[in-house]
Image (cartoon, rainbow, N blue to C red):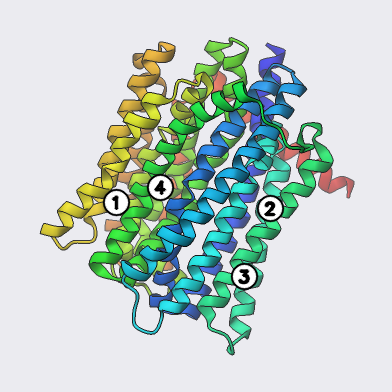
Amino acid sequence: MSETSSNNKRIAKNTVMLYIRMLLIMVVTLYTSRVVLEVLGVEDFGIYNVVGGVVAILGFFTSSLSNAAQRYMSIGLGENDLLETEHAFRQSVTLMFLLSIVLFIIGETIGLWFVYNKLVIPAGRLQAAVWIYHFSLVSVISAINQVPLMAAIIARERMNIYAYLGLFEAFTKLAIVYILMLTNSIDSLIMYGGLMAIVSILTFLFYLFYCVHNFLECKYSFYWNRPLVKEMLHFISYNLFGCFAWSAGVQGTNIILNLFFGPTVNAARAIAVQVSAVVTHFTGNIMTAVKPQIIKSYVSGEKEYMMTLIERSTKYAFFFTSLLAIPIIIEIEFILQLWLGQVPEYTVSFTRLVLCESLFGVFTPSLWIATNATGRIKNNQVYGRLITLSILPLSYLMLRFFSDPKIPFVIAIFSNIIYWFYCLFDIRKQLSLNIKRYIIEVVKPTFILSILLTGIGIIESYLIGEDSVFRFIIIFSSLSLVGILIILIILHKNERDFLILFIIKYIHLNKNRICNR
């Protein structure tokens, strides 16, 4: 019981650190996005995002390697075997380096050909787009090289360092914005891409410095263990397909929109995705904090605790995400006008659809982490991800008959729902997940919360009338207050007591720190 309590406190502490990181990054991201849109213009902003999307498809290596590295290092730490953890790290670095070479070759041949011959780029901006492509490739390769380092930090549950490095990356991007505003002699699009590539390199170097100086297992020398390589490649190969299918389904949609509608629609989608990314940081933070514990609890045979983590992390992630997402869906027109001033066409409808997709997407990460823990990921990463990949051909076929850029977003929502059901089916087979208990513990409370928040928000918006600061404040504050009350009501007593106790302790701790200063 004491060990479980300690694990819960660690998860809560890590989640708080990640939330502080998220809030600061959110403010910086919203500000920089507006300035970048103003400096680059809608067309260049769209070019940057669609060209970067081509590289992002090639960068599916990053996610697959990250999953493998985190799994094997978490297993080693869960078994208190430092040597096994070190071998997992060294082998991950070696495999990562080899795969980054492959990515570079593919990127500078097939990928570059695609940019020159297939993308819809306005006349006179092709060379700038090519420069952006090269810089984006540098950024992705830097991200691949830092995967084992991030895996070590997450496996060690040092979320404060993960948070600090994320803040460093955010504030350097803020500095880039000021440089863009002050410099007029160089093409702004090319300069933006180059500076972003430099930030990615500096971020990698910071991860490297911290891990080498703080973790014994992160002392690298060339390592090649054939049985371990075979096992890791078996795991990576399924992850590789799954990450490719996800990346192609998501980023491929961006390319399809470019082929049918041009870079202006890409700019609208980019803004919608940025708003969604800010909201879904809630999900990512909770899952990042809980992931090592899910894997370690499986390794140690604590199945009941593992199931509790899956249910609670999903439920809490949805609670926090919906408290932000639902008011934004209702008030998005006012928010975009206030934030951007110049709102590209389709941005409002895109943002609402992407946020709906994100809310359904909250249910799958914990189930997916559970399959990573068992290592039996074939069904999830091959058959399950074919559902995600289907977004691409279905969107293309539908757009051939109906010229409406909202179609891929609607298809993505239904794809997420079907993928969630498939993940539930897979976990039920692997770990005897109690579907009835899952519905009662997870689906029922999240459904109640979302229905009540949406209903109250729509009624308030109808009664108050036209968009205004007054309506915005009323809807956000009332939905936040009502949402918190609903959450406290639908939580179990032990969950409610734990949450309240944690908040009181956290406030008391910070009060003491302020007084001591």
Residue 28 occupies which quadrant of the picture? bottom right
**How many angstroms separate mark 4 from mark 1 (CA)?**
34 Å
The residues tagged by marks 4 and 2 sit, at their Cα atoms, a distance apart of 22 Å
- Residue pointed to by mark 3: 195
**Circle 1 or circle 2, nearest the eye:** 2
| Of 112 and 80, the residue lying toward us | 112
Quick check: marks 3 and 1 in contact, CB under 8 Å?
no
- Label 4 belongs to which residue? 247
Above or below, 421 relative to 402: above
Quadrant position of residue 292: top right
The label nearer to you, 3 versus 1, is 3
Residues at marks 3 and 2, CA–CA distance in whole angstroms: 14 Å
Q: Position of residue 218 (x, y in %)?
A: 76, 36
Q: Work out whether mark 4 precedes mark 1 in sequence or the reverse, and give the earlier one.
A: 4
Please tell me whether residue 344 is drawn above or below residue 459 in the rendered image. below
Mark 2 surroundings: few (<14), some (14-19) or many (≥20) residues within 10 A? many
Question: Please, which residue is most extreme toward the left here?
Answer: 401
At label 1, the amino acid type is Ile
Q: Earlier in the sequence, mark 1 or mark 2?
A: 2
Element type where label 2 sits in the image: helix
Residue, disc 1:
458
**Could you tell me if residue 415 is visible in this image?**
yes
Rendered image quadrant of residue 241: top left
Q: Which residue is mark 2?
A: 204
Up-down: is 219 above or below 191? above
Cα distance in 3D space between marks 3 and 1: 43 Å
| Residue 495 place in picture, x, y as percent | 55, 23
C-alpha gap between disc 1 and disc 2: 45 Å
Rendering coords of residue 286 (x, y %): 56, 36
